Image: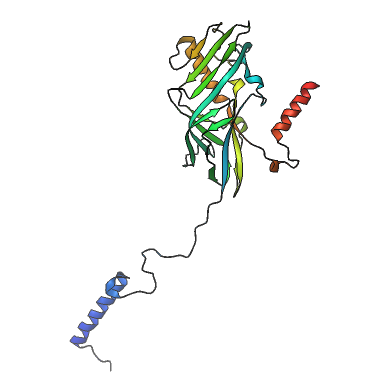
Amino acid sequence: MRPRLTCWNKQRYRSVLTGLVACLIGIGSPSCGSWSGNPPSSKIQTGITPAVEKQGTVEIVVQGTGTTLKLANNTLSVIDKGGKAGGQIILTSAQLVLSDIVVRRDPSDLTPRPRLSGPFVLDLLTNTITPKPEKLTLPEGEYKDITLQLYKQTGGSVQLTGTYITPNQKSSSLRITLDADDTLSLMKEAQAKVIQVTSGSSQQIALTFQLDQWFNFNGKDADLSHINGQDMTIDAAATGDNRKLRDAFLTNVKAASDFDKITTPSDNKDGRDTKDQDDQDDDNRGRR
């Protein structure tokens, strides 16, 4: 015969049961004593170490060039809006001032990326950047775009001086100072170039500016034909034909901006720089 719970035993049973339920609901509370299953921290230690992101470095340099990577005697040919020869410009200075340089996977890449913050002065006749940018450290992957932000300042973000010689040999001084703060995307959809970043890789990428395209006004609604021997300054205050010329010139600057990988001896078996070889091949073809 089973022993029956007395009234006192029933009350004690209820008390013990109530305490046990409270501990199960509030595991780890001070009233239930210490639990050996979890450490004191509120976060459970899984023992899994997050993977280290693989990265490589990119160094930015600059090249002011002609279309054929040659700029003889700092002389540029001018093409008028009808596509005809429009004289020549002998450059004495050509500079861009940038506030930011960012390497992106493509123009739609809005992920925060490491950026080079300036201002940086790019001298396109001496191929120098002042101050010298630090190397960018980027995650592994393909990058197809470099975004440049022009630095708006009193002295101009695009600065050019030189002598313009008309087709009938009249000379005049030319000064262009644009205070633009436009963004330049260097990705060309028709021929997308790729910066391939791999773990531990280190490479130089050149910002290239085809200066002879800056004065190719073929198909534009402005050119230098109205400059006929008089000195000319094109700046923010330009009006009329000069204003149209200013806008066309800025469009050309943006369109003629690009980037390219600097070839190192390790990139080709015979140790020759491929650009130097291309220049030599051009010279040989010109002699034939």
Where residue 24 appears, as percent x and y from the top left, is: 31, 72
Viewer can see residue 266: yes
Residue 244 appears left or right of 271: left
Viewer can see residue 81: no
The N terminus: image quadrant:
bottom left
Q: Residue furthest left?
A: 7
Q: How many marks?
A: 0
Residue 253 appears left or right of 41: right
147 in relation to 213, above or below:
below
Colouring method of the image? rainbow
218 in relation to 41, above or below:
above
Residue 7 appears left or right of 208: left
Where residue 139 appears, as percent x and y from the top left, is: 54, 47
Where residue 192 appears, as percent x and y from the top left, is: 60, 34
The C terminus: image quadrant:
top right
Residue 153 appears left or right of 251: left
Q: Closer to the camera, 80 or 72?
A: 72
Q: Closer to the camera, 36 or 92?
A: 92
Q: Residue at x 75, y 28 (%)?
A: 280
The image quadrant that residue 287 belongs to is top right
Q: Residue at x 52, y 9 (%)?
A: 231
Q: Residue furthest bottom?
A: 1
Q: Residue furthest right?
A: 288
Q: Residue at x 54, y 13 (%)?
A: 174
The image quadrant that residue 193 belongs to is top right
222 in relation to 15, above or below:
above
